[in-house]
């Protein structure tokens, strides 16, 4: 459709007088247009061998959309005699360029697409469409890259393998049947958590319990790794997805299904349309970590929400992790099929670990043999790994003798110092700044019950009271400065200038009063533009019908008033009719891109939510410019006022709202010394020093115990408030 429309419009441009003739006959325009349409149609039929039909018809056609709009605008400018004479003579060459860009280039792209390497398609027994299969694989790859490669493979416990002991605990969950006579029993040596999960059959649900640092998350991710491998080989199996429960109901009580859809969109960039479909079809296998990290006052509600979800989505399989003391303090119990408890390491296991590592830990081993405090400290895999990293190569006499809690604190302090000394040749930030920024980050994450940190999810509530004042003042000043500049440049009456300043004052007050930043991560094009297109179509049709009525009335009644006024009225109505028909066409074409076969982004970068919001703002600007541009050309509306209205609507849009808020927040944090301006670069720096781990576009402390250690510290001296 875009190819045909572009060809017709470019031919029409060359029929208008006043331009230089092109050495291209009109037959060639029509011939190439027909050839391009046939070529794209052929590519669409062949696309199943390389790309999906929806990508060829619903995605690649967007390449030709800007030239189509350009050719329409150029035709209207020439038709309305709005271009200077010195530019009119070049219109033919401009139309030729638009013809190449809008007709021949999309055809070439379509041919190149079918020559690409074929994608792996689902088996013939699968009910998935090729695009649905690609979306499934995209999510599987994200889970694998974020959690398996980013967290599991980058964990501290990689010096030597430790086989964790497991204990079955039926008394930790509320069973649908009577509790067995032996509610607790140690499982045979070598039993893995995935074996227990598999024993439960379809629709299985399992709880994993353990002490801090016992390996709950590692066990969960080991299960996830195995399940992802199975799901990649069999499309009939559910998609394993890892979530951290710490953000559940952080500010409000919500159902688990609602929270899952929000997390899918925020963490994995899955549109809610696809998420709802997968959730409704029970295509997920939910791996929920950190029940104990939910805000304490909401933790019991979270258990109830999980039970409600299980009752509503009966065949959805789930695994939940929690610290045992936090779980046992709850009044409610998960209605799961079973639970396992990760046992502490035995003295024999710890000794074997020291033996496997060998000489680097010989000094620690000598002290450990007779030191009951050190033995008690190293009974969890996490602390044992930190001991191995921190005390590597030291002699026995160098180890301090302290009570358990003081020794744990000393261990983390030594670990932090050792990590700060890593890669001194790549030292981008001083130790003082690194500690200050990590301390501030950990304290806010801890107080807000957050485990995964996303730059774009920082909120004004992270600021002190004085900083929030400066944040609001910054937001207020942006529209005011813009408005004052506009009033200075525009030649209007004093009263109009006062009204303008008043409008921008009100806008600044509204902007400054907003207490939450909501990046616009998805632009509902099909809803927004489809509605506008339908309204434009109705208005355009109504204007055309009204013109016909005027003509009929003039013919029947021969009324002098109608005869004198109808030419002017008809011209105005026809102009408006054409405006709204063009808008309807543009809106409808763009709305087609938001189809059910939505392509999931394959990568997520730090602060992507803000960049996505900015991108959506630019799309809205393009839509506004197109609409008001056509309106201005056909109705002779003042260009200056059209630009003013367009810019005001753009800045006031939710997408740009969020970007302005985020910018103001980052400015305040930078000036107050609580965070660097290039936050992603610093977080990568902390990741290199094994304080953090990167999960897609977010960051997580290597363990909650390290986060809690940082959060317990008094902030080093921060810069004064701006």
Image: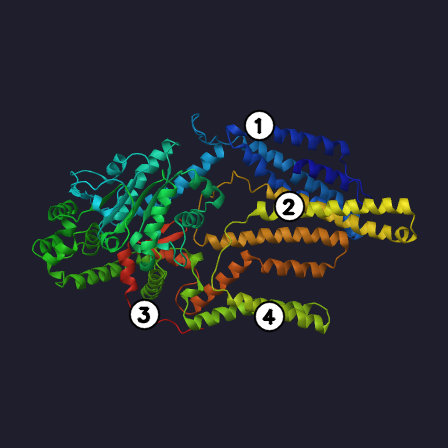
Name the spot of residue 656 as percent of width and height, x first: 55, 58
Q: Which mark is residue 45?
A: 1
Q: Earlier in the sequence, mark 3 or mark 2?
A: 2
Q: Earlier in the sequence, mark 4 or mark 2?
A: 4
Rounded to the nearest whole Å, what is the CA distance between mark 3 and mark 2?
54 Å
Q: Earlier in the sequence, mark 1 or mark 4?
A: 1
Mark 2 crowd level (few <14, some 14–19, many ≥20, 10 Å Cα): many
Who is closer to the viewer here, 18 or 675?
675
Name the residue tied to disc 4: 505
Mark 3 crowd level (few <14, some 14–19, many ≥20, 10 Å Cα): few
Q: Which mark is residue 120?
A: none
Across the whole image, how many numbered discs are drawn on residues? Answer: 4
Residue 466 is drawn in which quadrant? bottom left
Rounded to the nearest whole Å, what is the CA distance between mark 2 and mark 1?
27 Å
Q: Quadrant location of the N terminus?
A: top right
Rounded to the nearest whole Å, what is the CA distance between mark 4 and mark 2?
33 Å
For this orientation, the residue located farthest to the front is 178
Q: Secondary structure at mark 2?
A: helix
Mark 4 crowd level (few <14, some 14–19, many ≥20, 10 Å Cα): some
Rounded to the nearest whole Å, what is the CA distance between mark 4 and mark 3?
39 Å
In front: mark 4 or mark 3? Answer: 4
Who is closer to the viewer here, 89 or 411?
411
Name the residue tied to disc 3: 716
Picture layout, residue 47 above or below residue 485: above
In front: mark 1 or mark 3? Answer: 1
Q: Secondary structure at mark 3?
A: loop
Residue at 55% x, 52% y is 616
Name the residue tied to disc 2: 587
Q: Quadrant location of the C terminus?
A: bottom left
Picture layout, residue 413 above or below residue 584: below
């Amino acid at each position: 459709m875009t190819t045909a429309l572009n060809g017709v419009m470019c031919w029409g441009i060359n029929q208008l007088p006043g331009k230089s003739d092109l050495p291209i006959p009109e037959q060639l325009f029509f011939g190439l247009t027909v050839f391009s349409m046939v070529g794209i149609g052929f590519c669409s039929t062949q696309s199943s061998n390389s790309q999906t039909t929806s990508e060829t018809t619903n995605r690649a056609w967007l390449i030709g959309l800007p030239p189509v709009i350009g050719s329409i605008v150029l035709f209207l400018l020439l038709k309305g005699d709005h271009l200077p004479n010195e530019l009119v003579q070049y219109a033919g060459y401009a139309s030729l360029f638009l013809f190449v860009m809008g007709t021949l280039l999309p055809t070439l792209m379509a041919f190149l697409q079918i020559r690409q390497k074929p994608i792996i398609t689902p088996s013939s027994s699968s009910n998935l469409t090729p695009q649905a299969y690609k979306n499934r694989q995209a999510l599987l790859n994200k889970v694998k890259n974020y959690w398996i490669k980013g967290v599991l493979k980058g964990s501290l416990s990689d010096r030597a393998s430790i086989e964790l002991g497991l204990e079955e605990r039926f008394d930790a969950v509320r069973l649908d049947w009577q509790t067995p006579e032996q509610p607790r029993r140690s499982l045979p040596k070598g039993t893995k958590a995935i074996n227990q999960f598999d024993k439960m059959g379809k629709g299985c649900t399992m709880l994993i319990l353990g002490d801090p640092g016992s390996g709950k998350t590692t066990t969960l991710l080991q299960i996830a790794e195995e399940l992802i491998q199975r799901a990649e080989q069999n499309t009939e199996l559910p998609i394993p997805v890892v979530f951290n429960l710490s953000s559940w109901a952080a500010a409000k009580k919500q159902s688990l299904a609602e929270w899952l859809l929000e997390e899918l969109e925020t963490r994995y960039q899955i549109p809610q349309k696809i998420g709802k479909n997968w959730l409704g079809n029970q295509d997920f296998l939910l791996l929920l970590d950190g029940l104990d990290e939910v805000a304490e006052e909401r933790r019991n509600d979270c258990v109830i929400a999980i039970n409600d979800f299980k009752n509503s989505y009966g065949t959805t399989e789930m695994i939940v992790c929690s610290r045992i003391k936090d779980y046992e303090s709850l009044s409610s119990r998960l209605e799961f099929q079973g639970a396992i408890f990760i046992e502490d390491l035995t003295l024999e296991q710890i000794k074997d670990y020291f033996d496997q590592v060998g000489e680097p830990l010989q000094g620690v081993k000598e002290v450990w043999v007779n030191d009951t405090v050190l033995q008690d400290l190293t009974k969890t895999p996490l602390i044992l790994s930190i001991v191995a990293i921190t005390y590597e190569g030291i002699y026995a006499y160098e180890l301090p003798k302290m009570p358990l809690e003081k020794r744990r604190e000393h261990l983390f302090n030594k670990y932090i110092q050792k990590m700060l000394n890593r890669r001194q040749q790549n030292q981008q930030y001083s130790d003082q700044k690194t500690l200050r920024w990590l301390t501030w980050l950990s304290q806010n994450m801890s107080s807000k019950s957050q485990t995964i940190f996303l730059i774009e999810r920082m909120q004004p509530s992270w600021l002190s009271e004085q900083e929030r004042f400066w944040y609001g003042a910054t937001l207020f000043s942006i529209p005011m400065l813009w408005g004052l500049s506009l009033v200075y440049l525009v030649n209007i009456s004093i009263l109009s200038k006062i009204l303008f300043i008043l409008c921008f004052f009100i806008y600044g007050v509204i902007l400054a009063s907003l207490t939450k930043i909501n990046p616009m991560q998805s632009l509902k094009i099909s809803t927004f533009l489809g509605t506008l297109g339908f309204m434009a179509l109705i208005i355009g049709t109504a204007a055309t019908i009204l013109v016909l009525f005027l003509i009929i009335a003039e013919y029947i009644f021969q009324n002098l008033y109608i005869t004198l006024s109808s030419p002017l009225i008809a011209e105005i109505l026809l102009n408006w009719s054409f405006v709204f028909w063009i808008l309807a066409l543009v809106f409808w074409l763009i709305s087609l891109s938001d189809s059910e076969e939505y392509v999931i982004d394959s990568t997520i970068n730090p602060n992507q939510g803000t960049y996505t919001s900015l991108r959506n703002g630019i799309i809205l600007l393009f839509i506004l410019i197109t609409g008001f541009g056509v309106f201005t050309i056909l109705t002779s509306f003042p260009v200056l006022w059209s630009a003013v209205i367009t810019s005001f609507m753009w800045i006031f849009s939710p997408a740009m709202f969020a970007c302005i808020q985020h910018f103001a927040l980052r400015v305040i944090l930078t000036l107050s010394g609580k965070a660097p301006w290039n936050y992603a670069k610093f977080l990568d720096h902390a990741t290199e020093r094994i304080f953090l781990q990167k999960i897609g576009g977010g960051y997580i402390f290597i363990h909650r115990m390290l986060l809690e250690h940082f959060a317990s510290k008094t902030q080093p001296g921060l810069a004064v408030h701006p």
